[in-house]
Amino acid sequence: MFCNLSISVQELDFDIQYEIDNIKRRKKNFGGLASFLGQVRDSAENDKTLLFLELEHYPDMTEKEITSICNDALGKWELHDIRVIHRVGKLIPGDNIVLVLATSSHREEAFKAVEFIMDFLKSRVPIWKKEHYENNSSWVKSKKSDEELLSRW
């Protein structure tokens, strides 16, 4: 089965409805579309008020790793479309960070694929986050809980 795979790493915001409508215009034969939208929280785990989040990435390597993750998902589920957008640069609370869309003939496969892709995006993709507060800033460390989620796949 052919799957349309589209990946973007960008500074610009994205329009969720546009992305969904774009898939729906191209294909009418899917039974389910699942999505995940990640956005910047207004406070970090240390309860400090976040001024902005800075996301840095390693160009080309980032896209290659996301593509690899999506190809792994295609090996597990029959999918019609996968759309991944990950933002980089300076983001403020409430801004969109990441969008993952997947379509399949049945909803269960689309849901599982989106969850799988997000789990691996959080742990494997070379994107680094730096939180900026009023008086200081700090790099976000990877969480053990994110790594543990990978074992279910």
Image: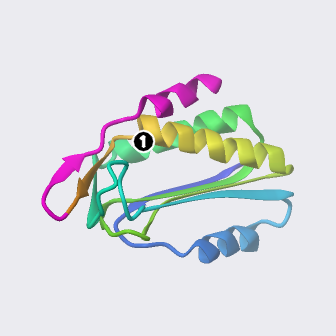
Give yes or no for residue 96 being in the magenta stretch.
Answer: no
Q: Name the side, left or right, on which 35 lies relative to 97.
A: right
Way the structure is coloured? rainbow
Secondary structure at badge 1 equals helix
Q: Residue at x 33, y 69 (%)?
A: 92
Left/right of residue 119 with respect to residue 105 in the rendered view: left
Residue farthest to the left, as pictured? 135
Relative to 119, 153 lies left or right: right
Q: Label 1 neighbourhood size at 10 Å, few (<14), some (14-19), many (20+)?
A: few
Q: Work out which residue is located at the far top of the displayed protein and give it.
A: 151
Residue at coordinates 40% horizontally, 40% vertically from top-left?
125
Question: 138 and 35: which one is in front?
Answer: 138
- Direction from residue 3 to residue 99 in the image, left or right: left
State the image coordinates of residue 35 (x, y, percent, origin top left).
66, 58
Residue 150 colored magenta? yes
Residue type highlighted by circle 1: Lys
Q: Position of residue 69 (x, y in %)?
A: 54, 37
Residue designated by label 1:
64
Residues in magenta, as a range: 134-153
Measured as percent of width and height from the top left, residue 107 is found at 82, 51
